[in-house]
Image (cartoon, rainbow, N blue to C red):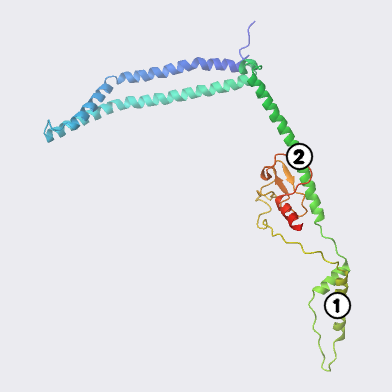
Amino acid sequence: MSTPANLYPGLNDIADVLEEYPIETSRYLTLLHEIDAKCIYSRPDLNNKIDSFLKDSFDKSALPVEEFKSKKLGSLTQINNLFEELMPSLEEKMHVSSIMLESLQALNSRLELAYEVALRNQEIPTRLRLGNDNHPAMHLHHELMDKIENKSATKSSQALKSESRREAMAAQKKQTQKPVPQSQNQQSAIAEDDKPPMKIKRVANGSVNEPKRRKRRVNTEVIAKKQEAKPISAPIEPVVKSIYVDRPKTNDYGEPLYCYCNQVAYGEMVGCDGDSCELEWFHLPCIGLETLPKGKWYCKDCQNKMKLKQ
């Protein structure tokens, strides 16, 4: 019974690439050896000419100056001619080397692609590819992977709880910040109090303008009633100057900023239970915590305010 040709496409391609590696390498190495054979005599001659030129350069006493200069110039001319003779062979070797490098890189790419195909089609058994699962190192690997997966799952649930708690506190804060509507009488009384006192005009005969005096009397009565209705004020609390006044509340995209780092909300965050907390929410790494605290939690600023009140 004949097996189909495409039963193991990844492994078949890997075998083809491994067969082509020595063929391609031997082809280009043969070309390089042929190029070296062209200059097998020129290269030793060039080395000898250079050595003799360097030796003659230090020996100036044997020949006159003019003869020494002419001999030196002749040696340089011979060296230059040998270089011109060898230059085409050297350029050809560089060209062949670059082509061989590109060919080997293409074979490497084919080998990697074939290996991915073999893994995707499960052509190589896991036990054959990774070895025996009973090795102690493999047990430790599986334990670590299970811990990482469990930790990521718990972190995601904690992040969802933190997000819902953050939204609930934001909605509660918006409700508490709504202004209480004032009655019409209180608004009229406050409007009358804000008006500057009207001047009393006298007529030529010395009488006083009566309606305006009555209006002023009404204002004084309203003020007296308002002062009587005011409860006794509590002792003045120490004013703590805010250090976050100049900080931007949102980023360039309109997203609100939280925490000491003045960044957007991400990951697990804990909300401050202070009534007038300016930052509201804090990232766990910024406050030095790894898990969400149980019970109420206050930031450093709210803790300082509570100490001042005490």
Reading the image, the residue beneath label 1 is 220
- What residue lies at 59% left-to-right and 18% top-to-bottom? 10
Q: Relative to 299, does residue 182 appear above or below in the rendering?
A: below
Observer-nearest of 134 and 217? 134
The amino acid at mark 1 is Thr
| Quarter residue 24 falls in | top left
Helix, strand or loop under label 1 = helix
Observer-nearest of 86 and 1? 86
| Quarter residue 46 falls in | top left
Around disc 2, counting alpha carbons within 10 Å, would you say few (fewer than 14), some (14 to 19), or many (20 or more)?
Answer: few
Position of residue 237 in the picture relative to residue 141 (left or right): right
Q: Nearer the viewer, mark 1 or mark 2?
A: 1
The amino acid at mark 2 is Leu
Reading the image, the residue beneath label 2 is 160
Around disc 1, counting alpha carbons within 10 Å, would you say few (fewer than 14), some (14 to 19), or many (20 or more)?
Answer: some
Q: Quadrant of the C terminus?
A: bottom right
Q: Relative to 208, does residue 255 appear above or below in the rendering?
A: above
Which residue is outermost to the left? 64
Q: Position of residue 118 (x, y in %)?
A: 61, 19
> In the rendered image, is residue 125 in sight?
no
Position of residue 192 in the picture relative to residue 2 (left or right): right
Q: Relative to 239, does residue 228 appear above or below in the rendering?
A: below
